Image (cartoon, helix red, strand yellow):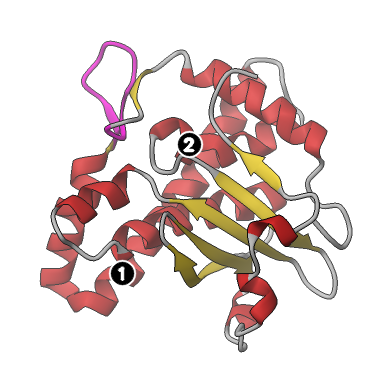
């Protein structure tokens, strides 16, 4: 990571521990992207619906481009709601600190939406900008298995990540996808006016090994 330190590793470590405690209170099957609240019927994430049903309905209503933008917006709203919910939960646990602020960044991994999210770069000046690599998750796998375009799945998870970051940093941020490689894809998260500029910088597509101090976010016990 470069530029002014925006997210410290110790705060992410605390957030990971808090997120692990939170998710142990729920019934999860990350392999299917399925999470329910306790023993009740409330479904928080259902991968089949997100990967197949929702994109099909939106595509019929709005067409491909409109469908993908709507899915991104839905994902972002989900990320914002997840971040707000986690902060509320953390306060109830007596943890009104950075762990509550960043805990929702682990949401995609715990729910099965992505096995790993890596913050390759984070800049604070001259503007906030994150370069993030997201490993393909269960949504992509479901669509790939049916021979479907994985763009809707990528747009949804990009929205979740940008929503969680925007809420954590209390800044208006959006995400834009860059050309990816098999098994992962990269997004730039920044203010909308920055994303409207040309992002065709070869450095953004550099091998992951070339990024110093990259932060890897994965689910699992701390």
Q: Position of residue 185 (x, y in %)?
A: 48, 61
Q: Is residue 209 placed above or below 201 in the rendered structure?
A: above
Numbered-mark total: 2
In the rendered view, does 135 fall on the left or right side of 99?
left
Mark 1 falls on what kind of element? helix
Q: Residue at x 42, y 47 (%)?
A: 78
60 or 205: nearer the viewer: 205
Q: Quadrant of residue 98?
A: top right
Q: Is residue 21 placed above or below 188 in the rendered structure?
A: above
Nearer to us of marks 2 and 1 is: 2
Instruction: Identify the residue under disc 2.
Output: 109
Q: Residue at x 61, y 88 (%)?
A: 198
Region in magenta: 32-45
Residue extending furthest bottom?
198
Q: Is residue 112 placed above or below 141 in the rendered structure?
A: above
Q: Which mark is residue 68?
A: 1
Q: Quadrant of residue 55?
A: bottom left
11 or 221: nearer the viewer: 221
Q: Position of residue 74 (x, y in %)?
A: 36, 57
Check the picture and name the quadrant holding the C terminus: top right
Q: Position of residue 132 (x, y in %)?
A: 61, 58
| Residue 171 in magenta stretch | no
Q: Quadrant of residue 57?
A: bottom left
Residue extending furthest right?
4
| Residue 36 in magenta stretch | yes
Q: Are marks 2 and 1 in contact (CB under 8 Å)?
A: no
Q: Residue at x 78, y 46 (%)?
A: 7
Q: Position of residue 88 (x, y in %)?
A: 59, 29
């Amino acid at each position: 990571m470069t530029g002014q330190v925006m997210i410290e590793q110790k705060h992410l470590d605390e957030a990971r521990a808090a997120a692990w405690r939170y998710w142990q209170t729920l019934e999860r099957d990350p392999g299917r992207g399925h999470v329910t609240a306790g023993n009740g019927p409330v479904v928080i994430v259902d991968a089949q619906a997100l990967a197949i049903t929702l994109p099909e309905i939106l595509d019929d209503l709005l067409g491909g481009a409109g469908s993908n933008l709507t899915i991104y917006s839905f994902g972002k709203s989900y990320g914002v709601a997840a971040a707000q919910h986690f902060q509320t939960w953390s306060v109830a646990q007596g943890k009104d600190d950075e762990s509550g602020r960043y805990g929702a960044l682990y949401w995609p991994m715990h729910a099965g939406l992505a096995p790993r999210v890596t913050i390759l770069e984070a800049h604070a000046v001259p503007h906030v900008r994150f370069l993030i690599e997201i490993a393909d998750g269960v949504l992509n796998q479901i669509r790939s298995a049916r021979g479907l375009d994985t763009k809707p799945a990528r747009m949804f998870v990009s929205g979740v990540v940008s929503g969680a970051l925007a809420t954590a940093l209390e800044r208006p941020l959006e995400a834009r996808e860059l050309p990816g490689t098999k098994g992962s894809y990269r997004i730039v998260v920044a203010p909308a006016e920055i994303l409207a500029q040309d992002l065709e910088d070869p450095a953004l597509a550099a091998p992951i090994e070339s990024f110093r101090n990259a932060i890897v976010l994965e689910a699992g016990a701390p």
